[in-house]
Image (spheres, helix red, strand yellow):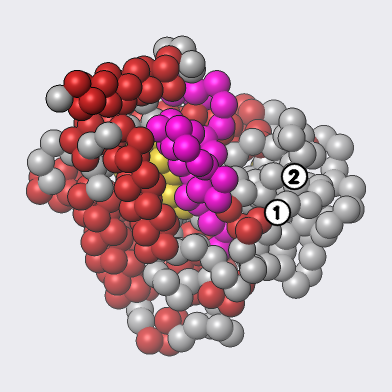
Amino acid sequence: MAARITNIFYSMLLVYLITKCDGKKQVPCVFFFGDSLTDNGNNNFLATAAKANHTPYGIDYPAGPTGRFSNGKNIPDFLAKSLGFEKAIPPFATAKGTKILKGVNYGSGGGGILDESGSQLGDVMSMKKQLINHGKTVADMKLLLGSSGRARVHLNKCLYVSNMGNNDYINNYLSPKYHLSTTLYTPQKFAAILTNQYRRQLRRLYKYGARKVAIYGVGSIGYLPQFRSTVEFMDSTNQVTQHFNDRLATLVQGLNARLSGAQFVFINTTNIALGDPSTLGIKVVDNPCCVVSKQTGLCDAGKKPCHNRNEYYFWDNFHPTETANHAMAIRSYAAASPADAYPTDIRNLVRRN
């Protein structure tokens, strides 16, 4: 009996000490799921072409190239700061011991909702794989805290952020060289397939204890430098992805109605990105800052990027600069208009009991 009381006391003390270090945090931990917009080092340990662990990536990040697909910080970095965390949430690849009590970043460049999305890039972690990894984290947390019940209480208080779907278009539906989905499905049917799979995955996340979940929509892929050719092509590409975004708000509504005690919110990435970039000091929205490879659209290793990086929206042909990432994170945390988030923004989501 005495030993059991000691273990309970130790577990409670451990949570207190770990969470106290970051001061006034709005949630005890954050878990990130996603693709290269989220990845902060997981792909460094995978056999994949989707890597950002070399210069000029990270040129403005204090630690240099870390695996973030930007010149500096990414969306999870800024979100974590807005939530009161002093340090970045660690990638799953290196998150060990008590570090996991503050959260884990499972993001993997090239990963998608569908397992086959991004497969041409090599070994990338799909949402399915990221959920498997989260299951391992949950198991470790039970051991750290001494019981399933204490782990559940802790996990229920955390924020969960999922930014998935971009690669299901970029590296699947819009890549007929590697995938048959374009010929097999209409845009509407493909969006339905994605949504149904995503629903199952988010329900699984709920079973792991998620109660506060923010879901990002797919961005305006037609505006990426990689896809800019004609206005007609840009518009048609954006119309294809909009079918999925339109379904996400309905998905969120359904999950909130059916999953007891949970609240899901939809972050309208497209609406946020359509804001006036000049208000951020951004002057260039159609070209990347770094010298990109014609084969991959990623930055060529070692080549000098532009010097005025804060005036560019895009870092390479696919990914935003730190300036653009900051703007996206700030408006998803605190919506600037009702159209930015549904039914509420992340700031209000984390306030709910």
Q: What element carries label 1?
A: loop
Residue 80 position, x and y percent, is 49, 29
Query: Residue 64 sits in which quadrant?
Result: top right
Magenta range: 81-110
Q: Taking the image as drawn, is residue 86 in sight? A: yes
* Magenta span contains residue 102: yes
At 20% from the left and 27% from the top, the residue drawn is 4
333 relative to 248, above or below: above
203 lies left or right of 65: left
Kind of residue indicated by mark 2 = Pro
Mark 2 vs 1, N-terminal side: 1
Q: Nearer the viewer, residue 241 or 179?
A: 179
212 to the left or right of 81:
left
- Calculate the distance from the C-alpha at mark 2 to the C-alpha at mark 1: 7 Å
Tell me what residue is drawn at x 78 percent, y 52 percent. Answer: 54
Q: Which mark is residue 23?
A: none
Which residue is label 2 attached to? 65
Q: Where is residue 310 in the image (x, y as percent from the top left)?
A: 74, 33
Query: Which residue in the structure is indicated by mark 1?
Result: 52
Disc 1 residue type (three-letter) = Ala
- Dominant secondary structure (helix, strand or loop) of the stretch shown in magenta: loop
Instruction: Please state, as top left, top right, bottom left or bottom right, where the C terminus lies in the image.
Output: top left
